[in-house]
Amino acid sequence: MKKLNYYSLLASVMLAVIVFASCKSSNKQSAETSRIGEIPEAVQYIVGIEKYDSVIDYSQAENWLDVPTAMVKDGVLDATAADGLKTVDVFYIYPTVTGFRPETEVCEMTDTMMISGAQMVRRTQTAVFDESCNVFMPIYRQISMPKPGSDYRAIIDYISRFDATDALDYYLTKLNQGRPFILAGHSQGASVLIALLENYMTKHPEALNRMVAAYPIGFAVTKDWLAKTGLKFAEGATDTGVIVSWNTEGLSNLKEKNMTLAPGGISINPINWKRDDTYANVKENIGSLTVEGKLVAPGIADARVDTARGSVVVTTADAKLYAIPADGAQMFGPESYHMHDYGFFFNNIKQNVADRIKAFVEKQE
């Protein structure tokens, strides 16, 4: 039997048109008054918005993909009982793993494809934080892939009000216990995180002061958004309290439409941690994940920031192996490396997380 190619599996999870099994819900019901409010026009075509009227009980361990095991007591989270934790947390929001479906829809908490895809992400993306952080990874009712041409930012700004906000608020008020923390995500998770940074974190400065950094990787952070929120983008490898983000693509993608980009978007080079177009040779990449999931060093990807487009350009990866599958080309472009925003730079990200934490701790001393 051939070894499972987990990146191919992730591609099928993200981009296949599927019919999935309906599952029972374990959600706590909300009060009679609807909390979904007036549904914006951009969101109205999405099936199942009414699901957000049921509130997820994030005190229950079953509603987290991962939390420190010491906190789980009889299926309930007990932050005061946690022993042996690291000094820093990461709160991670997973990307779209539910693929294209006949209708764009809000998934159930127990959607089998969402859970299995998120578990794979836990192993291949969130793992960059394992050595430095306690991992808090909530399950949230994401939407399946939107229709091409949708106002994705408006959609995410709306849906982020519900599960993601509830999970972040529960984490910060009940689980974090005053530790420094990192916020991170990818793709849909990154866009949700960007909305949370604007709509939640800026309104909670006491928590924002403990944020080592935010890594909303795989969705554009723009100059206009930074000006509006007052948040700062990273300038180097060790500044803290900043936004760290990039979007990865190949040379042939540079004139193509890519839904992860936006006018005024910014990327930082995830090898040399520079904002300008200084080239980082593949030999400077200290470790990448191959399509088979093997960690190789030096890595397989070089990196250069295209400052006009706001993306990170990779020229050394084999597009036949790593570019997004054809079904996604209409939205991401034919040589998008979106699925490898983490994997191409796996060890560099791991090292950067440790470096930013060290810099944050030294500032507090």
Image (cartoon, rainbow, N blue to C red):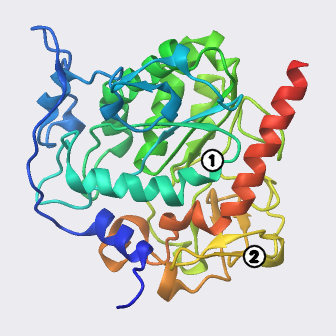
Q: Which residue is mark 2?
A: 297
- Residue 12: x and y, percent? 30, 71
- Residue 329: x and y, percent? 37, 73
| Residue depicted at x 27% and y 38% | 141
Q: Quadrant of residue 278?
A: bottom right
Quick one: quadrant of the N terminus?
bottom left
Dots 2, 1 in contact, CB < 8 A: no
Single out the mark in the foreground, 2 or 1: 1
Quick one: quadrant of the C terminus?
top right
- Residue 71: x and y, percent? 49, 25
Callout 2: 10 Å neighbours few (<14), some, many (20+)?
some
Tell me which amino acid carries mark 1: Asp
Measured along the vertical axis of the image, is residue 148 above or below residue 91? below
Tell me which amino acid carries mark 2: Ala
Q: Which residue is mark 1?
A: 130
| Residue depicted at x 48% and y 88% | 320
Q: Which sits earlier in the primary sequence, circle 2 or circle 1? A: 1
| Residue depicted at x 32% and y 63% | 14
Measured along the vertical axis of the image, is residue 326 above or below residue 65? below
